[in-house]
Structures are given as C-alpha cells and as structure tokens.
Image: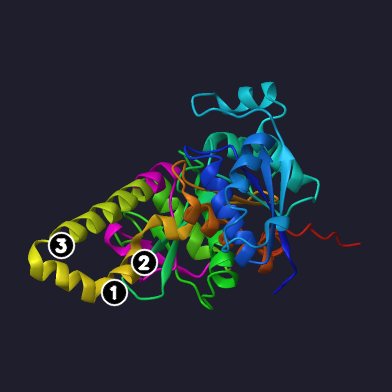
Amino acid sequence: MGSSRARIAIDAMGGDNAPAAIVTGALKAASELDVDVLLVGDPEKIDSCIKEHQKDANFPNLNQVEIIPADEVVEMHEEPLSALKRKRNASIRVAMELVKNNQAQAIISAGHSGAAMAAALLHLGRLRGIDRPAIGAIFPTIVPNKSVLILDVGANVDCRPKFLEQFAVMGTIYSQYVLGVEEPKVGLLNIGEEPSKGNDQAVRTHQMLVDNPLVPFFGNAEGRDILSGNFDVIVCDGFTGNVVLKFAEGLGEIVLNILKEELTQGIMGKMGVTLLKPSLKRFKQRVDHVERGGGLLLGVAGICIITHGSSQGPTVYNAIRLAKDAIDHQVLDRMQSQFESQKQLTAVPEPTTES
C-alpha cells in the first residue's frame, strides 16, 4: 500500500454551497489527511473563501492548497455533453484534465453528476475490459463497523448482464483492498433468493456470476438484505440503485429527526439526551450519508468521486478521504490487473493444426 502525499483536484464551483463549503472541506483535509488540494474554479471567489480561514487555528496548512483558474461552470439544468463541448474552460473539465495529465491523482465534484461522468469518459476513458463505469456507494449495515458497497447507484439506468458482471468484479476488488474485507460476499439485488427469480436480466446475470471465478458470489440479495450485513457487495442497475440510495438517505434523515424530536420531549427527555449524547453521535456517524463522502465512479481510468450537490464541508472532507484511500490502495492498478486476468481466463484458444 502506498503512503506518498496525494494530489487531489476538486471542482470548487460545483454544488449548491460552492465554493464556500468546498473550500472549508478542502482546507480541513489538507491539514489532516496528508494531501495537496487543487481547487479549480473562479480564483477570486475561492481566494475570498480561503482568506476567511486564514486565522483559523484548525487550518494551519493553507500552503497545501493551490488554486487552478477556470471561469466557467456546467449548470445543473444544462445537457452535459453539449455544455462540456461549449464550455471548454468549465471547472469540471479543467479538473478532469489535471488527472488526465497526471497533475492530480483524483478528482472530486459536487456539481452536475452527469457532467462529471461525461467528462470522465471523455478525458480519462474507461479501464480496459470495462464496458460501462458504475457509481459505487457505501452504506452502513446493522453489523457494527461493517459496510456494504452497492453499485451501480446512478450511472447506467439500463444494464446488460455483462455490465453487472463487471460491476461485481470491480466491487470485489474495492471491498478487498479499500474496505479491508478479506473474502467479500457478493450479491445480486433481486426480488427473491432463488436463481430463477426476477426478470430475464437477473436470471442471466445470476448464472454469469456463478460461473465467474473472480467473483465470490453468494446469490441473490433481497431488499431486506441490503443493510443486514449478510453481503459486502451488492450489484444492480443504476435505476434501481439510485432509488435505493435516495430512499436510504431519506430514511436516515427521518430517523435522526424523529430521535431528536422524541428524545427532547420534557425535562426527563432533555436530561436523557445529555446522557445519551455520545451514543447518539456514534449513531449519526453510522447512518448519516455525510459521513460517507459520496460515490466512486468505478471503471474509468482515474479516481473520481461524485458527491452530493448539497454537500457541506464535512462531506467534502470525507470525499477527499475516500479518494485518498483509493489512491493509497492502488485500486485502479488492481482493477486493471484483474480484468486482464479475466480476459486471459475467458480467451478461446486457437485451434491447433496437425502436420
């Protein structure tokens, strides 16, 4: 595992709270995570945000942050490809080019997710052997200190069985080398446990995963299995995965709000909250999507983190941590090596001719 100082490019103009929230998270990461941060966007606005933190004792390493000018932004209402072609100096495009030119090892964006995916494909390209990239999101489970990686959660609305098989291989590698699961259990999201359940796509994918020696496949996972801790990786198409992602985020917020409301009722409730404060803080860390930092765009030839448009400083900080983990564990090299191995395993030998 590598430990050299990482350089991470951030689209400082992307997101509802940019650039202030982006800068706050980036400065905290530069101070605590042994990373150099390249903030891409409007220099005047970024510099103004940085100056607000210059006297803050929590951010002593402001010299580890560099501003890269970019005077255009892909707005949320714009069609990604046409906007990227028209706005050649858009912050997401400039940031992506930094990774392409080896001036940064990863990119993070809280802006237009479609533009981030399009820019990644245009400038970084896919890893050899990958037909479609997938966004992977890390969810907590009922088992303490155990998470589950779900992919795809939004990059591909429709998926062929071959795509889902590739997602399973990428998820296995990420679970092993970044999440530290020695023998990850991979599941296919479906409406039943039996191999024959589901639509044609699910049935065909199930058999492909059974036959793939690179995937530790443990069968179908139903909706109730997602957060059970029974699986380490769950694959699905981007339509289903995005619904699961948004539902889980909404459910987490509802649970937190209900606890806050109910536990603070009356004098006894307020006293109880004081006693329970450490436990409630740990609970929030387990269920709050802010703590997870966003989703990884796996399958492109670069480390790319797509985070929430509403990201605040803590989300950006955790996204940078997520990117650094992927860099330190050499995820890209491991994925490329694994797909090369699969190619060799599935290659059809040429027929020999007898003399």
What's the distance in space between the residues labelled 1 and 3, CA to CA?
Answer: 15 Å
Amino acid on which disc 1 is placed: Ser
For the N terminus, the image quarter is bottom right
- Using residue 121 as the reference point, say whether residue 212 is left or right of it: left
Q: Earlier in the sequence, mark 1 or mark 3?
A: 3
Residue 262: x and y, percent? 13, 60
Residue 101: x and y, percent? 81, 46
**Residue density around tag 3, few if under 14, some if 14–19, many if 20 or more, within 10 Å:** some
What's the distance in space between the residues labelled 2 and 1, CA to CA?
Answer: 11 Å
Residue 286 shows which numbered tag? 2
- Between 197 and 311, the one lying in front of the other is 311
Kindly identify the residue that appears in the image at 67 percent across and 68 percent down.
328
Residue 43: x and y, percent? 69, 37
Q: Looking at the image, is 125 positioned above or below residue 352?
A: above
Highlighted range, magenta: 214-243
Which mark is nearer the camera, 1 or 3? 3
Kindly identify the residue that appears in the image at 53 percent across and 52 percent down.
316
Residue 279 shows which numbered tag? 1
Amino acid on which disc 2 is placed: Arg
Q: Which residue is mark 3?
A: 264
